[in-house]
Structure formats: C-alpha cells, structure tokens
Image (cartoon, rainbow, N blue to C red):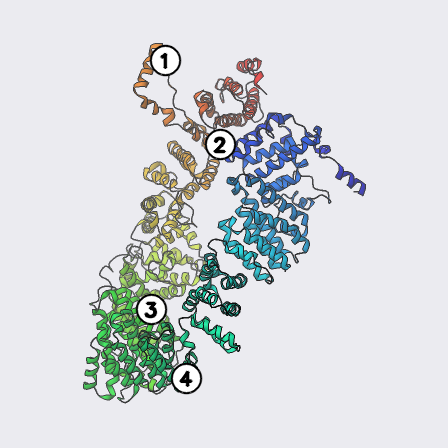
Amino acid sequence: MTSLAEQLKRLALPQNDPSLLDRSEVASLLFNCKEAATIDRDTFFAIGCTGLEELMGIDPSFEEFQSSLFSSTSKGLERSVQTKAVNQQLNKNISLFLIHLSPYFMLKPAQKCLEWLIHRFHIHLYNQDSLIGCVLPYHETNLFVRVIQLLDIKSPTHKWHWMDPIRKPGVPLARGTVITHCYKDLDFMDFICRLVAKSVKVFSECPSNSAQLRVLLVFYASTIVSALGAAEKITDTMVSLLLPYIQKGLKSSVQDYRAATYMIICQMTVKVTVETSLVHSLMVQISKTLFKVPSLIRDGLACLNLLLQTQKGDKLGKKPFNYLCKTPELVTLLQGLSAGYDVSPLLRYLLPHLVHTIVKSDTGKLTQVLFKTWASLKDRYLCKFLEEFISHGTEIESNPTKMAALNQKILPLIRLLERKYPKALDSVLEKHLEDCTDEADQNLFHQFISLSLSCGKYEFLEDSDTSLLLSLNHPQPAVRVLALQHLKDVIETSKEGFDQAFIEEAIFGRLKDDNRDVVMSALSSLEVGVCLLACEILPGLECVTGMYKVLEQAVKILVKEEILKEKKELLDEAVMQLLPFMIITNANSKSSDWKMAVCLSESDLCSLHPLLKGWPEALEEAVKSTKSAELVGVANEKMILLLSGNLTSGDPSLLLQMVDDLILVAETESDSVRQKVTTHIIGSVLVQCCCNTQMKENYFPVAIRVFRFLDKKIKNLRTCESAEETPLNWSVETVEETLVPKDLLSAYIEKLNSDETAQAEESAMVLFLLKDFINGLKPPLSFSKEESWWNPESLNQDSQDYLHLLLGLFDLLVSGASEGSNALQYRALMNLLFKVHLKDSEVLFKFLSILWTYGYNLSNHLNYEVSAMLQTQALYIGYALLESQTNQKKKQLLSPSSPVMVSLLINLGSPVSEVRRAALNCLHSLRGIKESLFHPVLQHLEQKTEEIISDPTYVAQIMETLFEELETQPKQKSQKKKLLEALENILDCVQNPVFPSYIARNLMKILHEIHGEMVLSHLLPALDRLLEKVFNKPEAMLKDEVILLHLILGKFNEYSATLLCKNQQSLDLFIKSLHAAKKIYEEIPPFQITALGQITKPFFAAVSDGMVQQKLLNVLFDLLLDCKNPLCAQTISSVFKGVSVCAEQIVRELELPEKTKSLATVQQTRRQKMQQQRKPQDAELAPETSHFSWQRVMLILELLQHKKKLRRPQALVPALFNLLSRCLEPMASEEENMEYTKQLILSCLLNICQKLSSDGSKVPADILDKEKFNVELIVQCIRISKMPQTHHHALLLLGAVAGMFPVSNTWNLCFGSSLWFPNIG
C-alpha cells in the first residue's frame, strides 16, 4: 500500500467501512455473520434488553443505561448522521457501560448486551479501544478471540495489529505475548494503566461494587509486574510513565488497587536503582497513606522494607518516620514481619530516629514505641543509643536538673534492655569502655552504667585491677578464684547492682572450668545456682581433674538444699544425667569410676527417686557376696532387675515419660565406656519391662518405644558391622538365659576398658535383647487368632499395636537373615518369632497375608509401611512354607475361609513385577489341589504366567476371559459350577465386612472387566453398607471404602441393568447413590457423579421396564431441580443428551395438575366460597401450588432444547400446548420467568415440527393430527406478550405449521384475522 493510500485509510471514517454496506454478512458476537444477517433489529434489541435485565438483577448500577443505550429510541439512532456532540456523549456512555460490563464479560447476559451494541452502535468500528479494554483481562479465553475477530486490524500500522495473528486460527492470546508487548510498546502499558485508573474511578463512586474490579486489577498487577520483570532494562521513560499511576494507586482506598501498586513498586525497585529524591517521595507517599487501608498496612510496611533494602537509604529525612509513628499497631506488625522476613532495612531507617527522639524529646510518647520495638534491635542500635546519651549528656551536663530528668526518663528503658538483651548490652558497653579515653565521656558512661541493675559486674576489683566480669574470665586460675570469692561476698551481703541472671551465669560458667580449685570455689558460691547443677553441670564434670571430690561436693549441695524434693522435674533430670555415673564399669575400689558410683549410691538421691529405690542395698549385697572378678557383671544384672522392677511397679501415669527419658539417655552419642555400657543396661531394663506380665496399663505403648529403640540400635550396628563371627558360646540358640549373659557383658566392658574393638560382643548383646523381647512380648487378650481375617480396620488399639510389632520384628529379622555375619542368628530369631507368636500354620499364613497385602492400604491403621522389598521377601518365604505343607493343609489354605488365595490373587495386579512373580510362585505351589474351588482359576493363571509378570493389568483380562466362558463356551456342568462358585467366593470377599476394605478394593480392580446381574447382586450388601455409612457417618469413611464404593457403582452398566427391573433393592440403592452428593475426599469426586456417569445410552436402553426408566428420569429431574453443584447439573445434562428417551416418558414428567372445574350455577359458586372461607388452609394444599413446580418444568424444557434422541416426539405436542395454555392464564403471569417458559415451549414445538418434517413438507395425519396443534394459543402468545423474542419464536412456529398443515382452516382463519396484526411490532 502506498504512503498516500495509508494516510487516506487512516483518515477514513468508521461509517464508511465497507462492512456496513454489505447486508449479506453482519458482524456478530453470538451468531455467525451470515446467520446474523437474517435477524432483524427488533430481535437484536430484544436480546440486548434481556441481557440488560439479567445484569440489573446482578448489579443495579446497570439501570442508568436502560434509558440511554437500551431505550426504544436507540433503535432508530444512526450515529453516522449525528452531530459531534451527540457522538461524543454516545462514546462516553458506551465507554462507561463497557467499564461496568467488563467484570461480567464471561456471563451470557453481558454477551447479549454486547451483541446489541455491536449491531446498533458498531462499537467494533467506533469504540475499538473501549471494547478491547473491556475484554483484555480475558485474553486467554476463546471469547476474547471472538471479539478480536470482529475488528479490522489487518493494517500493519494499526494500533492493535499485533493481535492480528490470533484472528485467523482463533487461538487465545498467550500471556507471554501480552507481557512482551507491554514492555516493548509503552503506549500499550500506558493504555492498561489508564484503563485501570479510569475503572477504579468509576467503581469508587459505588464502594459496594469494588469487588467487580478484582479481575481487572489481577490482570493489571500480573501484567505490569511480569513486564517489569521480563524487561532487560527498566528505562527512565518507563519509570516516568508508571509514576503518576503509582501515585494514584497509593492514594486510592480500593484495596486491590493499592496492593497491585505495592507489587509494582517492589518489582520496579528490585530491577532499577532510582534517585534518593524518588525514594524519599515514595516513602512519604506510602507512609502517609498507610492507614487508609488497614488490611494492607502489613503489605505497605513490607513494600517500604524492600524499597529500603534495594535502594540507597541515606538522607531520607524524618518525614516518613513521623507518619509511620502515627500508624496503629506498628510494632506488632513489625514483629509479625520479622518472624518471616529480614526487616533490618526498615529498622535501619527507623531506629536512629527513634533513639534520637527519645533522648532529645521532652515528651515520653515515643518512649513506649521504643520500649516495644527494642526486641528487634541489634548491637549497632544499642551503640547508637549509648552515643546519643553521651552526646546529649555533654550538652546538658552543666544542668543537674535536666541531667536528672534524662536519667529518670531512660532508666526504665535501660532496665528493659538489660533484662531482655543482657549479652548485647554487655558487648556494647565493653567495646565502648575500651575505646573511651575522654574523662567527661567516661563520667557520662559511668552514669549510664549506674542506671543498670548489673552495674556491679563492671566494678573494678582491687586485687586484680580489672572489672569483675573480666576477672571471672581471666586466664589465671587464681584471679578467677578471687572473682568467685568476691561474688560469694556479694551474695551473702545481698549487695545491689547484681542481677540474679548474671550471678547464675557466672557460677554456671566456672562450674565448667578445667581447674579443680575454681570449680570448688564455684560450688561454695552455689546457693543461687543449685538448680543449674542437676541438669547442666554434672555431665560436664568428667573433664575436671579430681572429678570424684567435685562430684561428691555437688551431690551434697543438691540434697542439702532440698531443691530436688520440691521440683520433681528437676529431680527426674538430675537422676537421668547421673544414672551413667552409677553404673559399675570398673571393680577396682580405688578407681574414680568406682568411688563415684558408690558415692551416688550412698547419697540421698536414691531415696528421693522411685527408679533408684533399693539400689544402695542391692549394690552392698553384690559387693559382699561376689568375687571381684565377677562383680561388674553381677552388679549390673542386679541394677537391671531393680530398675525394671521399680519401673513396672511404680505410678503407671509416669511410666511412659520415664521410658522416654531412659531412651533419651541410652541414645546419647558418646565414645566413653560409661555411655556405651549405659546404653546396654538401659536396653536390658526396658526389655525386662516388656517381659513383665504384671504391667497392665500402657504395655503396648512401652513395647513400641522399646522396639523402636532396639530397631534403631541394630540398624546402626549393621552399618559398621565387621566380618568377625560371633563366638559359638554366645549364640542366641545355645544360651537359655533370659538376660544378657553376665560373662558376655563383663567381656564387653573389659574390652572397652582396654580400648579394644568390641563389635562382636555388642552385636551379640543386642541380639540377646531382641530374643528376650520376642519371648516376653504377649498378645493382648482382645486379639483373637481364630478370626479368618486379621482386619486392621476393625482391631482395637492394642491389637493394632501388637500387629505393628510383629510386622516390625519380621521386617528386622528378614533383613538381618539375608546377609551379614549374624545371618544365622537372625534366622534363629525368625524361627523363635514363628514358634512363640505364629506357631500354628493357619495363624502364620494369616500373618503372611497381612504382609502380602498391607502395602495396598491407604489408611495405615497399623502405622507401619510395608515396602515392596518386604512384601516380596514375605511372598518368597510364603512360597517356601507352602511347598513344605501337606496336601491336606494346602486344601485348608485354599478354603473360602482362608485369606491365602485372595491375598495372592491381589498381588497379581501389583505394579512391581517381582511381587507378581513371587505371588505366581505361591499360586503354582497350590495348583495340585484339584478338589479346590479355585483349581480352574489356578490352571488358567498358570498358562499365562509370562503375560502376568510383564503386565500388571493383564490379570483383569484373564479373569474376564475365564468367567466369560461361563456363558459363551460349552463346559462340563461340574466345571461350570466350580467356576461359578469361585467367582461367588471372590465376590463374597468384597461384600463381607470381615474383609478389610483395601482387600475388597483391590479385588474389584481384578474383577474390573467382569459384569452381569450375578456380579451386581452379590455386591449389593456391600453397596448398602457403604451407602449407609456415607449418609450417617461420612467422617468415618476410609479412603479405601470410598474408592471401593466408586468401583461397585461401576458395576451398574448395560450388562447388569436388567437387575434394576427384577430386584427392587438394586434400584433403591442406585437411586440412593444418585443422592450421595457429599464429597468426602477432595481428590475423589462425589458418588453422585459416578452414579450419574453410569446412566449411559446402552445402560438406559437395557433397562427393559418402562416404569424403571420413568423412575430414573424422575430422579434425574428432581436432582437437577435441587442441585447446587454445577458439575452435577452439567453431568445430568450430558446424561439426558446421551440416553434415548420416549416422548411419553417426558409427558408424564410435564403433566400438570387438573384445573378446578368451572361451576355451573351461582349457588354452587357461593357454596364453594363459603367452604373456602371456613377452611382457608385447604387452599394452601391445592395441588397446583403444593405439588407442581414451574421451575422443574423450565429445566426439563431447557434439556429438551438440545435433545436429539427422542422417540415419537409428536406425543409431546398436546402436553406442550397444555403447558402453554396454563402459561397464558392470569394466575401464571405472577410466576417468575414465565416469558422465558413460553419461549422454551414454542422452541420445543418448533423442534418437534422440524424433526417430523425436516424439509417443511406436509405431515401425514397418522403421525401428527392437525387438530392437536392449537394455533389460537400461538396467536394469543403474540397478542399478550410484550417480548419481541416471544413473538419471534411464535412466528417461526407458525411458519413451520403452515408447511405441515397447508389446508388448515384454523390457520387460514387466524392469518386472515386482523385481531393480532396491530401487536406485531
């Protein structure tokens, strides 16, 4: 195109557009261009008015456009001949209307309104910017593309030409494209910003409508922020373009607009460094308007923080600070922000001003702010505070009154700081003391210190010529002793200037000293620090030379002060910390270990704590009656028996906590001999507790804790296992003792004391503990091994815990028996587990069935995870055991009451191929039992071994093929009977509540392809039980049960549909499932949706009984009337479209109650009025009002609009005319949407005509009698109605009837009449 042509095109007016002169095609949003050309203006006007009325019902603000853009005068308005002023006003109205319309653009009423504006005012030519602004937030929808296709933007110079590529393919505009164009074309960015500013202004006039801005503001924020992020460089031009809109956003009280502005500021400042003046301006604006929107104060503070973090924060002035101090709850908000983010940039600005204000200001108002905010301060601000004090003090030092006032003002603050942050304050003071050389500054510094509680710590000691604080940490022990002596004098005289925290900390630190004299001196000053000794100090005394004497002194202080008697928690902690020191690891009476153990046993500590009760006597007896060489073993054995006895006979309410404390001590990591021996002693104590039959309460919680401790210990030992074999005389099989052998324990301790490796002994001792645990573990009385299934879902807590322990033991022993130097020991323990807990083969296979299948459980009642590896190992062990069973025993295992067959069958659908292979091996070992019900199934599976191993879904195909042969292939009667019994037995497992729901769920997956009446009838009890639970106890529904119910509903299909006609229970349950609308698990759809999905065309056709079909239709329509879930309504619509329905069935659903008969005489009329006055309540129960719903009729008619599979549609004609007749009655006019109902009826009649005569030719009388067409009613519709759409539908119907009944007298009479012509607009 030449330059001149281009210029002429730009100058061309919209009214000269060629499309306006071509009437063969008309621009339209709702119709294609050719169809739109056939529709008249009144129809378009009616469409627009209908849309406006619906929008007014949603948002009353649309009423103002009823008298302008949608008035009757607008139908004749042609803007090409109007004056400039008129067009300007029109453009203003259209722009305003499109702003109001934008939030509702995706709704049908809004599209109807746009259709009128496009047709009448040609907004796609005259108001392109406003139209695009209206639809731009929806650029990722197909409807947006439809609007863009109306625009002529082919010219490369057109403002919106960049959208042209989406017009032809009709694909939505990608978000990335919008973002890229936004930062490349700043005019487009400005367009978005102006659009938002204008929309905010419009909606701000009606605060209640601010929610309508959400879609636009989300688009605004996401587009501008993303564009700023995607741009390689943010230019000055871009910043200057955005600044006016940022200021508008900060001043606005619209929450979302302000939030979007904060986001834009953050993104902009992250990407570019701006001048300090701009930072100051933004800070002032943000802080000044922060409290305008209280809900966004936190976001505003976060924005300020990021602004200060990314920009230079110097010389920003005090103005923002003053505004921020007026913000309510500022401190609380800052504290909340600091929990998740680093707020130091904002504090870096705020706090110097705060500090300066509090020191300089005469008012104490801001002091309170500082008090609260100080919790977030760092050392630098403490330093700043001290500097401000000294600086201001220098100015007013000569005035004692002012100085006293200053001291009085800051005294509470210094005390607060000292209490909350003593270390930070000490650090700052020490540093300042080192740097302070000026005498005047030193005097002010000492004044500052004198205000604190702990000024004494900075007091100089005469003997050391340094402060108390430095003396306590002096490198020379003698100086530290002098400092502690001074501290003791301070405590005794209660000297002021020393806070208790400092004293406790000083003693605490010196008790950890590596010099004995210092520690002894600290102990002598311990009156205030006794409580620290028990829980913190004693474990650290091991490194002190001469520890025995120090420990003896410490224990005496503990008992003497009687602190432990008063504080039980402290006593427990002290005992747990001291317990390792009481264990005998050396029989040498002169060793410090021995002296320490004896010292503790002779102290009053043993009499204070129930766990140590009787230990002094037991140790004394062991010493007197045992040789020195055996003393270690005997003493530790007595300790094990004593502690376990005390544990089990003590207060049951304290048992669990004590067990937890002991395990914590045992699991302490240390290389010391004492700690290693302690671990095994405590382990033995805990195992002995589990062997105690007297312990009734908390037995299984204790047993689980003990097992977890053993499991962790064993797995840790395995990781560092050596190749050394355990000596034969320490084998778990050959030693019969119930405790760890004394010789083994003594040998272990001896090796540790000699710094030798004791790996083999340690492993052997742990295995002995495991052996004792297996022997001592007792099943709960409630656990019945006679049950056919051990169902984890129905067991009580003790039984679940017992099974948890059996699973854990099996897992631990199997993994140990497969490899390592102790494999033989683990195998022996596995045999012991079987012998003690799973002695009978039936019980053993019940347990194995749990192992084989528990991995499929979604609820995990046993709180144990069975891995695929463990499952496979259990299957191979099961295979070995099955191979060794007699035929008689195998026959029992294959009986319907045994879980073996079902459990193995489930594993054929496992996603792990090795699991499938192992399960097949087990099944092959059972194939020789020909008497079994499952023999044909086993034979069939054996033939398909390779396919099953290769494909986890193949087993479902095999089962389908196998049981299909029941009907399709001739077989012997006995074989068919066996197959049938096998299938029934499997189905009984699904419906029997004894079986776990995860077993039933997986069986249903295997039976996925097997259908029929027999299958469904067997599953009805399960369906009934589960639906009952859904309606009565939905919160108790397990995930496995929910999925199982969905799978059972899947069995309602064309193969089983006839059962609904024969079995009333099946119909009732199916209808009940259609009403199960509650979603129990978020990721699983409601049962209602699954049940609706089963009503397919084949299913509905297979329901041979018309009454049952009628019942289903009735339920569907009732559901549609009552449902509030859009998915349900959509599904019902799809179901109705898909099924083939007879028109007579729809007629029954549309039947109206009979009208009251007209009365023949005046007397009868009076009599009836008298009766109505006597019994007014009878009128309330009139059939038409109590049993009939126009809403239901309307919904059915809407469904019929799109219904294609309708048999004998002509049967609907009388019913539809009956409905039309009732619509035209005066009483019916009071109903809502009656005009819409008339249009639906007329449309249905037209559709029927088109189905009966697609080419408009005459219809034979045997198909549809012309007498059934009440043309007068159609004419009456036109006469009474004021809606052009109703006229349009009626005229189309009359046109169709004219072709079908050309010689109708009624037709000629009506068309020849002038009664209704005046009303046709």
Q: Is residue 189 visible?
A: yes
Left/right placement of residue 57 relative to residue 158 reads: left
Secondary structure at numbered mark 4: loop
Nearer-N-terminus badge (1/4): 4
Q: Is residue 845 visible?
A: no
Q: Nearer the viewer, mark 2 or mark 3?
A: 3
Q: Residues within 10 Å of mark 1 (few under 14, many from 20)?
A: few
Q: Nearer the viewer, mark 2 or mark 1?
A: 1
The quarter holding residue 21 reads top right
Left/right placement of residue 531 relative to residue 83 reads: left
Kind of residue at badge 4: Glu
The label number, if any, that marks residue 462 in the structure image: 4
Residue at numbered disc 3: 708
Rounded to the nearest whole Å, what is the CA distance between mark 2 and mark 1?
Answer: 36 Å
Nearer-N-terminus badge (2/1): 1
For the N terminus, the quadrant is top right
1055 versus 495 height, above or below: above
Q: Residue at x 32, y 18 (%)?
A: 1173
Secondary structure at numbered mark 3: helix
The label number, if any, that marks residue 1198 in the structure image: 2
The quarter holding residue 656 reads bottom left
Nearer-N-terminus badge (4/3): 4
Secondary structure at numbered mark 2: helix
Secondary structure at numbered mark 1: loop
The quarter holding residue 318 reads bottom right
Return the x and y of residue 842 as percentages of the image width and height.
Answer: 27, 61
Rounded to the nearest whole Å, what is the CA distance between mark 3 and mark 1?
Answer: 90 Å
The label number, if any, that marks residue 1159 in the structure image: 1
Q: Nearer the viewer, mark 2 or mark 4?
A: 4
